[in-house]
């Protein structure tokens, strides 16, 4: 079992993350004495679905300091009203931990809880500090879901990822009533995965997917609500050089992206490596942003003249620019836009990251190997 760096709240909280990230395993390890409601268990789900009043009766009978875990709480969102009832009591000492792999129903029904009675935390796939694997080609190809990392052979990893993509990403999203036409949605997934980590033009993608623009927008919302992907927005600077406004969309795991794109059965192509590397690094940045409680804004910057910085992190009143390269050799020209940004003082620190084996130093730029940069994130030394 992997050591996870996830930091729980002492209050009641949501723990949200895609299926397979290890939420249930972690909860059972950390809260061995908790009362556990597993809504993926058919018998438990049916029992409570048929008699929802039973849930409140059972919770009322528990000792005051009980910890109650409801796994996949979005399956029965009606329980959120009961949980709110208990949390609103002045003498309440019970802690509720609400696990979920879809934020859609929670957004619609849990406004009172999210307004302050229960905090919200995200559970991500494994980061380098947890898995300690620096075979980057394997990480980019098969991702860092715990099950994928645990499997020994390439064949097993491929079978797992293909089953995951079929049964979860396609069928379960449809079961959530988000998507009515599974064939259309499946084709959209194929097209969207090929655009991973790239600037998204909704109209163009809708044309490629053969559906209306509004339908594509709804599909992206379904992916975001199901925690399968997220947007990376542009950083805006007051300048005469106009930045591109369209955001990028990133899937949550590189192995899932490769599978959806139909590429997991082959070695990574050179034209894909950079996008996969960005996907993985964004995952690390988002995870450590939560663990270290940075409260950082993560953006990218690109102009119509193709000046680009992969990530700009606004953290503690400082801005850190990061340029990521899939090359094993760092070339001087890789840092030209970081240099310009540093000279114009719209970033405070410039960092280069590459797949070489030695750290490097320039007057304005710190260049790290990917492994060493991930250790910097772990040590909270980014800024």
Image (tube, rainbow, N blue to C red):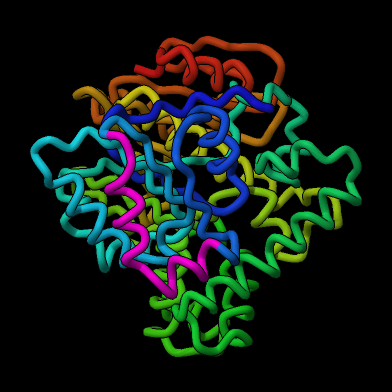
Q: Is residue 238 visible?
A: no
Q: Residue at x 46, y 75 (%)?
A: 219
In percent of width and height, residue 56 lies at 29, 57
Of 357 and 362, which appears nearest the observer?
A: 357
Query: For this view, does 306 lie left or right of residue 297?
Result: right
Q: Is residue 308 or residue 161 the one in the foreground? A: 161
Q: For this view, does 348 lie left or right of residue 3?
A: left
The answer to which of 133 and 303 lies nearer the viewer is 133
**Residue 197 place in picture, x, y as percent:** 53, 54
**Who's the residue at 46% across and 12% down the image?**
379
Asked if the magenta segment contains residue 349, the reply would be no
- Residue 65 appears in view: yes
Check the image and name the residue furthest to the left: 90
* Residue 193 located left or right of residue 141: left
In the image: residue 209, left or right of residue 60: right
How far from the left and from the top, in percent, is residue 115? Answer: 15, 50
Assign the N terminus to one quadrant of the image: top right
- Point 54% across, 31% down: residue: 334
Q: Is residue 158 above or below residue 47?
A: above
Q: Residue at x 41, y 15 (%)?
A: 380
Tell me if residue 48 is in the magenta stretch: yes
Tally the marks: 0
Specify the principal SS of the magenta part. helix
What residue span does the magenta drawing correspond to?
A: 44-63
């Amino acid at each position: 079992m992997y050591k996870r760096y996830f930091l729980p709240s002492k209050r009641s909280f949501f723990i949200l993350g895609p299926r397979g990230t290890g939420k249930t395993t972690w909860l059972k390890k950390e809260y061995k004495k908790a009362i556990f409601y597993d809504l993926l268990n058919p018998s438990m789900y049916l029992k409570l679905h048929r008699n929802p009043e039973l849930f409140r009766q059972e919770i009322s009978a528990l000792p005051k300091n009980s910890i109650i875990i409801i796994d996949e709480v979005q399956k029965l969102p009606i329980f959120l009203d009961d949980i709110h009832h208990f949390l609103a009591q002045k003498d309440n000492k019970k802690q509720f931990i609400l696990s979920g792999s879809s934020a859609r129903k929670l957004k619609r029904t849990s406004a009172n809880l999210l307004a302050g009675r229960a905090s919200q935390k995200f559970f991500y796939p494994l980061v380098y500090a947890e898995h300690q694997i620096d075979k980057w080609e394997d990480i980019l190809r098969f991702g860092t879901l715990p099950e994928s990392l645990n499997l020994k052979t390439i064949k097993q990893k491929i079978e797992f990822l293909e089953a995951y993509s079929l049964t979860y990403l396609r069928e379960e999203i449809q079961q959530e009533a988000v998507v009515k036409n599974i064939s259309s949605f499946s084709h959209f997934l194929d097209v969207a995965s090929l655009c991973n980590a790239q600037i998204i033009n909704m109209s163009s993608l809708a044309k490629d997917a053969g559906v209306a623009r509004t339908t594509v927008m709804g599909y992206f919302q379904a992916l975001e609500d199901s925690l399968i992907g997220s947007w990376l927005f542009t950083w805006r600077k007051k300048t005469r050089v106009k930045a591109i406004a369209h955001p990028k969309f990133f899937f949550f795991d590189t192995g899932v992206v490769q599978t959806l794109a139909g590429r997991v059965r082959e070695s990574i192509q050179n034209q894909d490596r950079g996008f996969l590397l960005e996907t993985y690094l964004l995952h690390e940045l988002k995870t450590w942003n939560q663990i270290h409680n940075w409260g950082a804004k993560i953006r990218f910057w690109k102009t119509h003249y193709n000046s680009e910085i992969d990530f700009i992190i606004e953290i503690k009143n400082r801005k850190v620019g990061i340029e990521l390269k899939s090359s094993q050799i760092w070339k001087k020209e890789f840092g030209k836009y970081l240099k310009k940004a540093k000279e114009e003082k719209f970033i405070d620190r410039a960092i280069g990251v590459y797949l070489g084996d030695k750290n490097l130093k320039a007057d304005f730029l710190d260049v790290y190997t990917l492994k060493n940069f991930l250790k910097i994130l772990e040590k909270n030394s980014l800024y």
